[in-house]
Amino acid sequence: MREGKHAVNGLLTFLIYGIFALFSLLLVVIGARVYKNIVSTGNENTEIRSSFSYVANKVRMSTRASGSVCIEEKDGLEVLVLASAVEGYETRIYYYDGALRELYQASEQPLSPGMGEKLMELSEFRIEETDTGHLVLYAADSKGDERSLHLYIEGESV
């Protein structure tokens, strides 16, 4: 009878260790998923914030140097045109082929969207002008969550 009792005790001990191992494995899998989601969300937020900061700084630099910032439609694309300190040249910032792009070229040259330097990959990026002289930047991450930045240009109307 004692041998049967030891077998049952051994089986119960093994069962408890097995359950502990199973829950430990489950906890690791859940933790890995949570970590992956946190990193993914952090990367998307960083890309959007970086795109806003980049465009805002370029606009501020342009208004100090030449004072000229405008939004134009070129070849069906909405383009933020920033006049350069060098006469006859401009910086064009636009969204094309899933990325925010920048192109520095002569003002009279037509826009070649594929030639622009890829700054950041985003699922959407728009720039709008308000009646009060503000620029509103809109960007969306891969999940479609849209964020905006209102940019006031001191002493200038866009």
Image: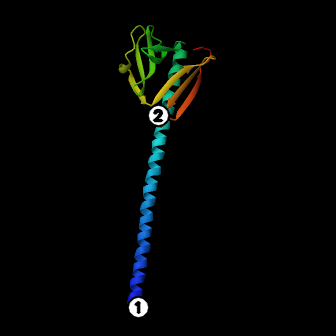
Q: Residue at x 61, y 17 (%)?
A: 133
Give the residue type at disc 2: Glu
Q: Is residue 111 above or below residue 139?
A: above
**Would you name the residue on which mark 2 appears?**
47
Question: Percent x, y for residue 118?
Answer: 39, 26
Type of amino acid under label 1: Arg
Residue 156: horizontal and vertical position, in percent? 60, 14
Q: In screen coordinates, is 155 left or right of 55?
A: right
Q: Residue furthest right?
A: 132
Location of residue 133 with respect to 48 vertically, above or below = above
Residue 81: image location, x then y, percent: 48, 15
Q: Secondary structure at mark 2?
A: helix
To which residue does mark 1 refer?
A: 2
Extreme residue toward the bottom, this view: 1
**Where on the picture, by quarter, is residue 157?**
top right
Q: Residues within 10 Å of mark 1 (few under 14, many from 20)?
A: few
Name the quadrant of the C terminus: top right
Provide residue 112's location: percent of width, then percent of height.
37, 16
Which numbered disc flags the more N-terminal residue, 1 or 2?
A: 1
Horizontal side, residue 120 vs residue 152: left or right: left
At mark 1, the secondary structure is helix
Q: Which residue appears at 46% of the width and 44% of the height?
A: 39
Question: Front-most of 84 and 10?
Answer: 10
Residue at (48% x, 34% y) in the render: 141
